[in-house]
Image (cartoon, grey):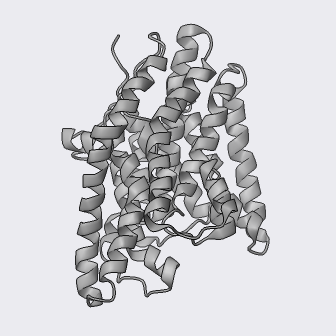
Amino acid sequence: MKGVYFKGFNALRLYAALSVVVQHVSYSPHDWFGTPLLPVTLECLFLNGPDAVNLFFVLSGFLITYLLLNERERTGSISIRNFYIRRAFRIYPVYFLYLFGVILLLQPHYRPELLLLLTFFLGNAAFVLFFPFPPFEHLWSIGVEEQYYLLAPIIVRFKAHAAKIALGVILIWWGVMFLSDLLPTGILTAFVQMSRYDLIALGALTAYAYYHQWAILRLIGYRITLIASLLIILYAVVFVPPSTGIFHSTIVGLAFAVLIYHIACGEKVIPFLHHPALEYLGKLSYSMYVYHPLFVLIFYTLFYERLSLPIYQLVAYPTVIVVSLAVSWLSYEKLERLFLNRKERFRSDYVVQQHTSANL
């Protein structure tokens, strides 16, 4: 059976991961230790961190939902047990290797409540309650996706109502975010901003529209809609500093959904997006996202006070990126492939094989 292959999605994932790495090189030492932010250089070529994570959310919502829709159509149902096992094989090895490996390596003194939240993929709650806790803050986004994975197969099984549920999640969460903006900054407001279930649901709804060829695709499929979306994303890349505001993040999230739809249709939207090297490197994006803050922390500890700020900045970006890619390659080839191969045992032979792993 011919596998489903959305060519170009891995390159999108790679760009999102690199965007997060670039921002963390500049912002994380400031968040952790109060050091000055690095002068803006590479940041103007990449998405800011929140937008990059939001791209992950929309993309994951699309991919996972599409696969579940395919399974439901071919079999009339969805194996929830097998879905959970497949997700565990993909997410858990790298996540827990990093979590417990760093704890053993650095022996940081974290509160037990924090570690408990991280262990059970409640990193968004941990972020709100305990920030900063280097180098684990970034695990919040994986927690949000895991919370989506917990419910996704159950929701998609409801054939008549699944799309309505996705739309309801979007509208309700937008309403909650709007109301939270009117409240003084506090735990509830922060949690709402760090739990973008609406953007995952937006990706899911885009998958429904694409899979069932809804009439609204005529509007999304217009070239002018794509161009407008690309201009919005370009503006976010060049001009927008890190922001979690509902208006900005929602508009950019919609632009991501339009871009993902056009790429899923096989359009060559961006030059080199389908290049085989980018396709392969995109497979390393999950482990690169998980591992890189450790290298940001190590590089800062070793060199920040020994180098002038211009030299530190010049060396930090390429060093952290290259080391993160190298370790991610080793992790993917020597660890993750073992679990990915085992994961296939729990993929029913009637389900279309997904060549691009649907993760962060």
Q: Nearer the viewer, residue 308 or 229?
A: 308
Q: Is residue 264 left or right of residue 54?
A: left
Q: Is residue 213 visible?
A: no
Q: Position of residue 16 (x, y in %)?
A: 39, 54
Identify the residue at horizontal 62%, vertical 22% (top origin): 80
Identify the image quadrant of residue 248. Answer: bottom right
Identify the residue at horizontal 79%, vertical 71% (top origin): 183
Identify the residue at horizontal 56%, vertical 69% (top origin): 133
Q: Nearer the viewer, residue 324 or 266?
A: 324
Q: Position of residue 284 (x, y in %)?
A: 32, 45
Q: Position of residue 350 (x, y in %)?
A: 46, 10
Up the image or down, 104 lies above or below 97; here it is: below
Q: Is residue 226 left or right of residue 254?
A: left
Identify the residue at horizontal 75%, vertical 67% (top origin): 187
Number of residue marks: 0
Up the image or down, 323 lies above or below 328; here it is: below
Up the image or down, 73 lies above or below 323; here it is: above
Q: Nearer the viewer, residue 44 or 80?
A: 80
Quadrant occupied by the N terminus: top left
Q: Is residue 2 visible?
A: yes
